[in-house]
Amino acid sequence: MQSGFANRMHIGLIMDGNGRWATARGLPRVRGHQAGVKAIRPVVEAAAEAGVGTLTLYAFSSDNWRRPAAEVSGLMALLGRYLREEIATLARSGVRLGFIGRRDRLPAGLAARIAEAERETAGAERLHLRIAFDYSARDAILAAALQAAQAAQAGPGLSREAFSRLVTGDGAPDVDLLIRTGGEQRLSDFLLWECAYAELLFLDRMWPDFGPADLTQALARFARRERRFGEVPEAAVAA
Ligand code: FPP
């Protein structure tokens, strides 16, 4: 469960543009993903420094299985390497690592490494870093609906909060700010339930070029947004 992270900000990040970043440099797409992995550490540190509670990174969607086999296996290998190389640093800097998405289609060794990484960082409380891997928001909502239907047979229906816990799996709060790099303006089956009132920020920068300064700027833009959650602004009520 999420405990201390739940009252702090949640940022969702769609790390798009690795392929185009590589192609523009005459490199194979997998080199873009390598550069994309490198970009993660400074952004995670900057998020923790800024007091963000939860950061969810979209690393592999369930639809990404349809990519060429070499790219898929390249992404699996990169995740394995990321876990090998980053766990100690993450644990030291107070980052709890969690995964959302299916694990049963991943190579057995990778699934075991994910479980190990989650165990090793379970006590950290500075930032909850969630990686969405073989993830589909629609599948997560469908799985929650099936569980809710079963629960409804045994008793009264579920509250919205209880259903949210089924969808997120780990009690993560709603997304406050959703950032997508790479210039596209869509959600691509990412955290659809959790983004109900998220502020959306679509940036042209390709993910490998995204750094701490971009995160700081994104947070400043977020701070200027007026979030109303369907209510009327106070000034309008007084008028
Ligand atoms: C989208 O870029 C990016 C992905 C599908 C994968 C994101 C993955 C990483 C940053 C690296 C893997 C992360 C971990 C933690 C192992 P794209 O390939 O769709 O780029 P394009 O839109 O330019 O083609």
Image (cartoon, rainbow, N blue to C red):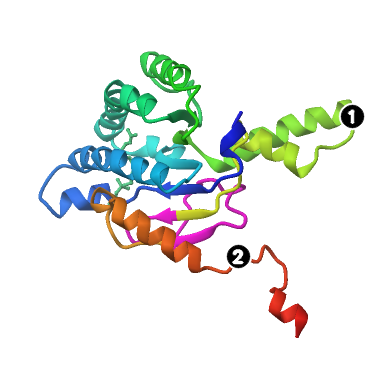
Q: Is 226 positioned to the left or the right of 89 in the image?
A: right
Does residue 105 sit above or below 210 in this rendering?
Answer: above
Does residue 122 sit above or below 144 in this rendering?
Answer: above
> Exactly how many numbered labels are in the figure?
2
Q: Type of residue at label 2?
A: Arg
Q: Is residue 184 visible?
A: no
Quadrant where the C terminus is found in the figure: bottom right
Q: Is 214 positioned to the left or the right of 164 in the image?
A: left
**Quarter of the image holding residue 235?**
bottom right
Q: Give me the residue at 60% from left, 65% from top.
A: 227
Q: Type of residue at label 1?
A: Gly
Q: Which residue is mark 2?
A: 227
Residue 124, given in percent of the width and then of the height, sits at 47, 26
Q: Nearer the viewer, residue 27 or 50?
A: 50
Q: Which residue is mark 1?
A: 155
Asked if the stretch drawn in magenta spans residue 141, the answer is no
* Chief SS of the magenta region: loop
In space, the residues marked 2 and 1 are separated at their CA atoms by 36 Å
Does residue 59 sit above or below 204 in this rendering?
Answer: above
Q: Is residue 180 visible?
A: yes
What's the magenta region? 179-201
Toward the right, the furthest residue is: 155
Q: Is 154 positioned to the left or the right of 173 in the image?
A: right
Give whichever of discs 2 and 1 has the lower sequence position: 1
Residue 63, given in percent of the width and then of the height, sits at 43, 40
Residue 31, given in percent of the width and then of the height, sits at 18, 40
Query: How many neighbours does mark 1 have within 10 angstroms: few (below 14), some (14-19), or many (20 or more)?
Result: few
Tell me, yes or no, whether the two marked residues, 2 and 1, touch with CB atoms within 8 Å: no
